[in-house]
């Protein structure tokens, strides 16, 4: 196959995978409520439930739209808007986790538990250390589809006259 044939297939695959990745996260947030509100309270101490609700709507609606290729530019903007505060969350945890881990580590008395906790501590800190980088990639992909829209194999192609373009 040539590039002209492969490009729409690969772009659609990227769009669908991006959307499904966010949809899984959004559904998980809904099922584990009020965890999302507790997380939101770390950066929005006032109105955490409201901001968590808005974040979940952005996440689920944006993910569904990107996955289906429905109003893709708007759906992708919703995902980008969801992602922006997540950078602050990763920063928060990178500031808090080392000190919290030290307190917990010092209170553990059994050697086996100390050893297991070291692995847990490293993984927790590492997940937030790379988490902001992963979110930067997801943000870039979301911005790509904000501008590009759904090129092929999506609902936007069936209703091209109804797609709202932002750029």
Image (tube, rainbow, N blue to C red):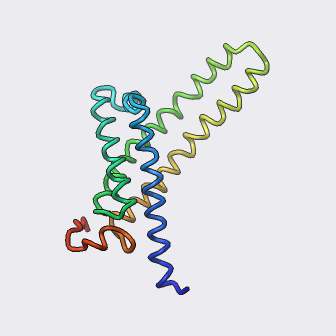
Count how many numbered circles sit on residues in the image: 0
Name the residue rendered at 57%, 22% in the picture.
Answer: 100
Tell me residue 113's x, y (percent). 74, 21
Report which quarter residue 48 is drawn in: top left
Q: Can you give x and y, in whole percent of width and height, for residue 131 in the image?
A: 53, 45
**113 to the left or right of 146:** right
Question: Residue drawn 59% across and 28% down?
Answer: 98
- Give me the residue at 69% from left, 26% from top: 117
When the figure is inspected, residue 156 is found, relative to residue 21, above or below; the finding is below
Front-lying residue, 134 or 18: 18
- Which corner quadrant holds the C terminus? bottom left
Asked if residue 99 is positioned above or below residue 29 in the image, the reply reads above
Q: Quadrant of the N terminus?
A: bottom right
In the rendering, at what x and y percent does residue 63 appear? 38, 53
The furthest residue to the bottom:
2
Give the vertical position of 79 relative to 34 (above or below): below
**Between 68 and 98, the one nearer to me in the picture:** 68
Q: Position of residue 74 (x, y in %)?
A: 28, 59
């Amino acid at each position: 196959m040539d590039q002209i044939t492969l490009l729409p297939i690969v772009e659609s695959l990227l769009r669908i995978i991006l959307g499904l990745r966010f949809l899984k996260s959004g559904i998980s947030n809904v099922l584990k409520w009020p965890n999302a509100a507790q997380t939101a309270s770390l950066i929005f101490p006032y109105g955490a439930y409201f901001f968590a609700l808005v974040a979940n709507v952005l996440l689920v609606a944006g993910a569904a739209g990107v996955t289906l290729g429905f109003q893709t530019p708007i759906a992708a903007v919703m995902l980008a808007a969801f992602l922006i505060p997540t950078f602050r969350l990763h920063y928060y945890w990178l500031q808090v986790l080392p000190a919290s881990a030290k307190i917990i580590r010092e209170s553990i008395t059994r050697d086996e538990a100390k050893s297991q906790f070291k692995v847990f501590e490293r993984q927790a800190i590492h997940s937030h250390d790379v988490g902001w980088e992963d979110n930067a990639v997801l943000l870039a992909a979301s911005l790509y589809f904000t501008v590009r829209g759904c090129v092929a194999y999506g609902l936007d192609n069936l209703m091209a006259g109804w797609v709202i373009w932002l750029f």
